[in-house]
Amino acid sequence: MVRNRRLLLTAATEAFAERGVEVSMGEIAQRAGVAKGTVFRHFASKDDLLAAIMLQLLDRLLGTADRLQEADDAGEALREFMTAGVEALATDRAFCEVIGRPSLQHAEVRDAIARLSDIAETLTARAREQGAVRSDITGTDIVLLLGGIHQTAEPLLASHPQVWRRYLQLTFDGLRTPDPHPLPHQPPSRLNLTDPGLG
């Protein structure tokens, strides 16, 4: 049972990362080398399967973010967190396409997203305190910028898979502007990735 679940998660993670969330459950079963019924014994629906994969991805980001909270150089820690976040988006189509889907309504996924948002705020606050980024940047800004950087690079990723690093550098340099103009809008409130408007 445990082995089949692991095989299914590995096969589904690879398939969704390569082709997005429209891959069929039958193809996932074929990749995993199990019967289609085995998929549904472990995951009642595709959204349940996506939720399990999202938890794996979020757990990896949370592990990185937790480690970075204790870093001496808060600016470099924030940069490393942003790098991990954009890289996850750039290398995994499912991570982007799942936003707004019912899988995000799973309590464990919502809790993981809330923890990630909290850690992003902590990392950003430490960077502000050390003067590594401008004083009006929030953790919510950072999380939203991750998606913006990915969207900028996305049309080029097939031929230039590392091009996102260029736009991450441009963005981070903007965050460190020594004498910035005031931002023209109030910072957004706490991010809610389960909002259908983000899908």
Image (cartoon, rainbow, N blue to C red):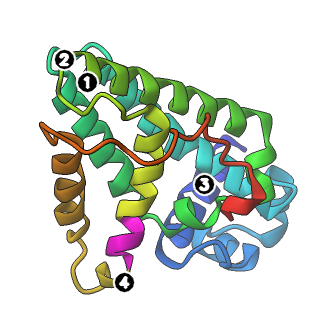
Query: Which residue is labeled 3 in the image?
Result: 9
Number of residue marks = 4
Q: Earlier in the sequence, mark 1 or mark 4?
A: 1
C-alpha gap between disc 3 and disc 1: 36 Å
Specify whether residue 46 is painted magenta. Answer: no
Which one is closest to the eye, mark 1 or mark 4? 1
Front residue of 148 and 101: 148
Q: Secondary structure at mark 4?
A: helix
Which one is closest to the eye, mark 4 or mark 2? 2
Query: Which residue is labeled 4 in the image?
Result: 155
- Residue under the point 65% across and 61% down: 98
- Residue under the point 23% across and 63% down: 167
Q: Secondary structure at mark 3?
A: helix
Q: Earlier in the sequence, mark 4 or mark 2?
A: 2
Task: Say whether marks 3 and 2 touch (CB < 8 Å).
Answer: no
Overall secondary structure of the magenta section: helix
Q: Earlier in the sequence, mark 3 or mark 1?
A: 3
